[in-house]
Image (cartoon, grey):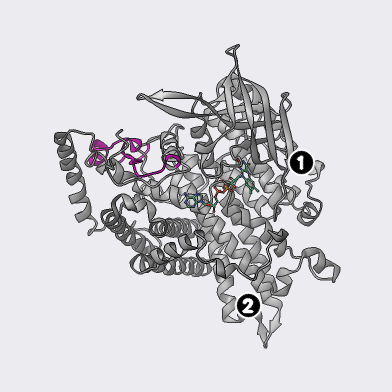
Amino acid sequence: MNPRRPRTVRPVPNPVPDTMSIELKDPPKAGALEASVKTEAADVIDTSKMNKEQAAALELAEAARTVTDYRSFAGDLFMGRFDLAHVYPFPEQSAADAEAGRPFLTELERILQTVDGDAIDATGEIPDELISRLAKLGAFGIKIPKQYGGLGLSQTNYARAAMLLGCVDGSLTALVSAHQSIGVPQPLKLFGTEEQKRKFLPRVAKGEISAFALTENGVGSDPAKMTTRAEPAPDGKHFILNGEKLWCTNGTRAGVIVVMARTPDKVVNGKARSQITAFIVEMDTPGVEVVTRCHFMGLKALYNGVIRFTNVKVPAENIVGGEGRGLKVALTTLNTGRITIPAGCTGFMKLCLSMAREWSGGRVQWGQAVGRHAALADKIARIAAHAYVCESMVLLTCALVDRDNADIRLEAAMCKMWGSEAAWRAVDETMQIRGGRGYETAASLKARGEKPVPVERMMRDCRINLIFEGSSEIMRLFLAREALDPHLKVAGAVLDSRQPMGRRAAAALKAGGFYVPWYLGLAIPSGGIPADFTPELKGALRYVEKTSRRLARTLFHAMARNGPALEKKQLTLGRIVDIGTELFAISATVLRADGMLKRGATEYGREELLHLVNFAVADARARIAQQFAGLGRNNDSQGYRLAVEILEGRHAGLERGIIKPGGG
Ligand SMILES: Cc1cc2nc3c(=O)[nH]c(=O)nc-3n(C[C@H](O)[C@H](O)[C@H](O)COP(=O)(O)OP(=O)(O)OC[C@H]3O[C@@H](n4cnc5c(N)ncnc54)[C@H](O)[C@@H]3O)c2cc1C
């Protein structure tokens, strides 16, 4: 690559360049033309106008990104394709799978009913006895195959467990989830050798706690800045690990953890390429030290700490996925791992709904129950709708994992981003609905003889979901990168100035061959609505189909208008991503409702379900309209300029007359 010359639409930096190297069963393929002109995305990145750090981050991220031919339903929406083949009829959990999970989930529910979340919050500790009971039940090996001592349950059953946990206690959810969504079980399941699986999986399935250590002081969203190093030992059989990891959840209790470390660079195409490698580290190895336990606004019983490694001898056989593939391991793990957060958020929002309903139905002010005042009624409706939408998105995504072993990078990221933001809004509204009692601690409410409703604790516990396992901003960047991917594959070679003119002209012809019919085709409906679809919900699907074509045109115009500068237009890309996410949310919601209505789901009356879903759809449509409007008319540049002035200290006057904490 010639680093000096810009060549093509610059892909959005993808700090979580998730990959999917697990086997894909019969994936839907990219269109033939698109596939025939595809280029490795990493080859079309223009890093020439970036500073060294930006370029390093992008190159590392892109190198960890695996290109698959899988066409996801959610990804297709950005291309104006509405293909229900893999999502209709809604892939309900099979009776056999539900039956397989029933004994575990029933017992889990029984145990969780005894958990005192307020006591956990107050003491900052999860009782050992509770952890032992959960371990005995198999809650630390839910998805670990039976042959390695786990329960061997599906992603859907795991998500159902997370839904239960999510409405009980945040710290407990994080303990169980960090252990198996990102800790040792998931990376080993995806990338481990048979020996590694036999050695470690039975231990962690039984309840030996595990963790995942990527973050460092200088490494948040950007792994290129990693300083933890592992050098090959002279014996050729070990690596010597040195460095310090920050905020390692479960780290203070773990027996074994996955650590990401830099290993010696490799020369690829004549250029040194950074290598990040994943190691399984036994916490009792000499040189491993828990420096401190960290404490946060919420999740008071999180066993989270700073872990230091000083000349730690790690067997080379403990490398997961091969040397230099650590980022791939980490990010692939997070692909499915991050579904646990929105699953937990679903349970959490249902609890918010229950609290909001109970309070606002009984509390009378100004002559009627506060829930019947329109301002509060709107909040109640929204909490309910969002709980249902989130559950639908999660269940659909889990089903795609269970049934098709599908590449659900986009769907999972959408679930995580949408679900964590909806849960935060839900707890905020629940606090507002409960008024002063929302703000009061459960202990104080109890001391006054009132029901100890822990909205205050829930709010503290909930906020982190927008930050860890891919912050909302990073999720939007990731989704934008993936939304642009088909265009990079098609148009990448055209502007590649390294290529001889003849080859570029041929590529242009091919790209034209794709773009002309594709763009013209966006005027025509891209997919039919199933004839037997619930009549009352057909309109919503028609709307998704039509709006996905509008979205595809909008993205294409944004690319054409901005070229490489599109990368810097994070707010434009964010709106596009939000529209795509809302379209996925509507689809999941109405497809699930259609399935429920057809099988005569007993938990819901027909009329009530239609009211709920139609409200959810109207609500999403209003947000989509707002995002489209924002794409046309906004003050993004003005705001950016102002922020830069502020960063440059030109508005220091505004900060005069304040007292800063610690006098700083
Ligand atoms: C309670 C808790 C538990 C955690 N558990 C673990 C764990 O088990 N293992 C582990 O490895 N890590 C863990 N983390 C770390 C967590 O994943 C990071 O906090 C997260 O990745 C964000 O990194 P950062 O906090 O350094 O923020 P930064 O990366 O410094 O980002 C700061 C802000 O800038 C935004 N931002 C960054 N880059 C961009 C960009 N390019 N464009 C737009 N916005 C951007 C971010 O979204 C964020 O809002 C935990 C953190 C906490 C607080």
Residue 13 horizontal/vertical position (percent): 41, 45
3D distance between C-alphas at marks 1 and 2: 39 Å
User: Which image quarter: residue 377?
Assistant: bottom right
Q: Is residue 253 visible?
A: no
- Label 2 crowding class (10 Å Cα cut-off): few <14, some 14-19, many 20+? many
Residue 24 within the magenta-colored segment of the rendering: no
Q: Amino acid at mark 2?
A: Gly
Residue 41 horizontal/vertical position (percent): 34, 38
Q: Which residues are magenta?
A: 27-53
Closer to us: 198 or 305: 305
Residue 33 within the magenta-colored segment of the rendering: yes
User: Which image quarter: residue 503?
Assistant: top left
The disc at residue 131 is: 1
- Label 1 crowding class (10 Å Cα cut-off): few <14, some 14-19, many 20+? some
In this view, 413 is above or below 187: below
Q: Which residue is mark 2?
A: 371
Q: Earlier in the sequence, mark 1 or mark 2?
A: 1
Q: Is residue 463 left or right of residue 291?
A: left
Q: Which residue is at a point 48% across and 42% down the rendered structure image?
A: 16
Closer to us: 88 or 569: 569
Q: Which quadrant is the C terminus positioned in?
A: bottom right
Secondary structure found at label 2: helix
Secondary structure found at label 1: helix
Q: Which residue is at a point 67% across and 87% down the rendered structure image?
A: 366
Q: Is residue 72 left or right of residue 32?
A: right
Q: Residue furthest top?
A: 235
Q: Is residue 640 left or right of residue 99?
A: left
